[in-house]
Amino acid sequence: MKDSGFGSFLAGILIGGLIGAAIGLLLAPAKGDEIREQVGEFVGEKRAMIEEAISEGKAAAEKARAEMMATYDAAEGGAAAEGAAS
């Protein structure tokens, strides 16, 4: 009975994976807790920036709406005055 080499192949993959994982842990720049903290800070900063942009956008939209309503009311009032004068 001839060995197909498949067992040796799987053993090589397993050993290579373990060696790669060990090297990755040894060369990691920070601990998991530190990385999670950095990601949390990054997300918090971006969330604050997005909330600020949304708030500014709402304020600008409300201002534009108020200006358009004032222009519309002025035009409507002028049209009504012209109609009354006729």
Image (cartoon, helix red, strand yellow):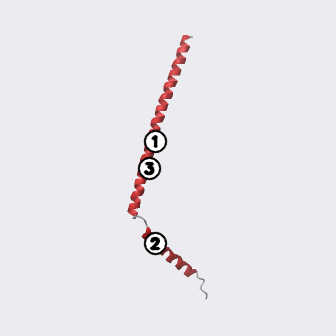
Q: What element does badge 3 sit on?
A: helix
Determine crowd level at label 1: few under 14, some 14-19, many 20+ residues with C-alpha closer than 10 A: few
Above or below 7: residue 78: above
Closer to us: mark 1 or mark 2? 2
Residue 55: which quarter of the image? top left
How many angstroms separate mark 2 from mark 3 (CA)? 33 Å
Q: Where residue 65 sits: x, y (%)?
A: 49, 31
Above or below 8: residue 76: above
Q: Amino acid at mark 1?
A: Ile
Q: N-terminal of the two: label 1 or label 2? A: 2
Residue at image location 43% in from the left, 46% down from the top? 49
Q: Where residue 50 sits: x, y (%)?
A: 45, 46
Q: Amino acid at mark 3?
A: Lys
The answer to whether mark 1 and mark 2 are in CB contact below 8 A is: no
Q: Amino acid at mark 2?
A: Ile
Which residue is the extreme one toward the top? 86
Q: Which residue is mark 3?
A: 46
Residue at image location 45% in from the left, 73% down from the top? 22
Residue at image location 48% in from the left, 28% down from the top? 67
84 to the left or right of 37: right
How many angstroms separate mark 1 from mark 2 (CA)? 44 Å
Q: Which residue is mark 2?
A: 23
Q: Which residue is mark 1?
A: 54
How many angstroms separate mark 3 from mark 1 (CA)? 12 Å
